[in-house]
Amino acid sequence: MTIPADTAILSRKARSWTLVAGLALVGLHLVVALLTLVWTPFDPTELAGRRLEAPSLLHLAGTDRLGRDLLTQIMIGSRIALTVGTAAVAIGAVLGTTLGLLAAFASNWLDDALAAALDILIAFPTLLIAMLVVAASDGANLSTAILALGLGLSPIVARLARILAKRVLLMDYITAARTSGTSWPAIVRIHVLPNIWPGLSVNLALQFGLAVIAEASLSYLGLGAPPPNASWGRLLQEAQGTVFSAPIGAITPGIALVSLVIGINLLADGLRERNDPARSER
């Protein structure tokens, strides 16, 4: 069945807008996060007004239950979410890709053992693994949350890296490279990593969104970044007691969290369309 040219063009435009919308949402949060390094409306710990003030020209998002400016807290939350997401995905990518490549190059019995171990780890939710790591550490802090989430994400990345790498290793150009005397490290650097990266990049973008949600969940449970870090999860936890009398305290961090996750998912979807020639031609 042949797809009309006009339909194909409209489909490609829709996919490009998906990528643009994702970049715009994530970029907005990135700009806000960078802005907090040099400026915020108020000091994050300053009691800048009365408790639970409604939005006004002075406090655009109102104040929280302690009288702190809520917009400042939301802005700081963007920085924490992006920092945790980026660092956790970086840890998960390094550990996961390394494990996946080792499994792909290993002998059959070792490959089967590593694959079974990864399946067992993946059976446990990332948030549960992160909670266990944080609970086993000295105390909840931002570094511990990042490490915990990175460890929790690594099995998912490892399994995908293993599958993609084994597929690449079956290609004729790998056999030709080995015949010409190219070493395995060079093969990994020249052939394997560049060919598995498009698939990994989409998965890592999705894992980024998962890490943002997991960090908010940890903070909501009191296992994430401790005060005075203004994590969106902690803001939601603090606002649950006043959700009926001052709903803005729960609505604004919720909107911020949802908008960032939607932006990341749109970005991942746009990357998948760009990296898949078969889909882009449809």
Image (cartoon, rainbow, N blue to C red):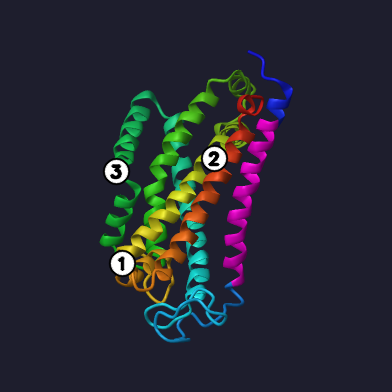
Residue 99: in sight, yes or no? no
User: Who is closer to the viewer here, 36 or 266?
Assistant: 266
Task: Reply yes or no: does residue 38 show up in magenta.
Answer: no
Type of the residue with mark 3: Phe
Q: Quadrant of the C terminus?
A: top right
- Tell me if mark 2 has few (under 14), some (14-19) or many (20+) residues whose alpha carbon lies within 10 angstroms of its own: many
- Inter-mark Cα distance, 3 to 1: 21 Å
What's the mark number on residue 23? none
Q: Earlier in the sequence, mark 2 or mark 1?
A: 2
Alpha-carbon neighbours of circle 1 within 10 Å: few (<14), some, or many (≥20)? some
Task: Look at the numbered disc 3 and give the secondary structure of its residue.
Answer: loop
User: Which label sits on residue 202?
Assistant: 2
Q: Main secondary structure of the magenta part?
A: helix
Whole-percent x, y for residue 156 in the image = 41, 40
Residue 186 percent across, percent down from the top left: 60, 35
- The stretch of residues the image draws in magenta is 10-35
* 257 in relation to 176, above or below: below
Three-letter amino acid code at the position of disc 2: Val
Identify residue for label 3: 124
**Of label 3 and label 1, which has the lower sequence position?**
3
Q: Above or below — where is 252 with respect to 275?
A: below
Q: Name the residue under label 1.
A: 222
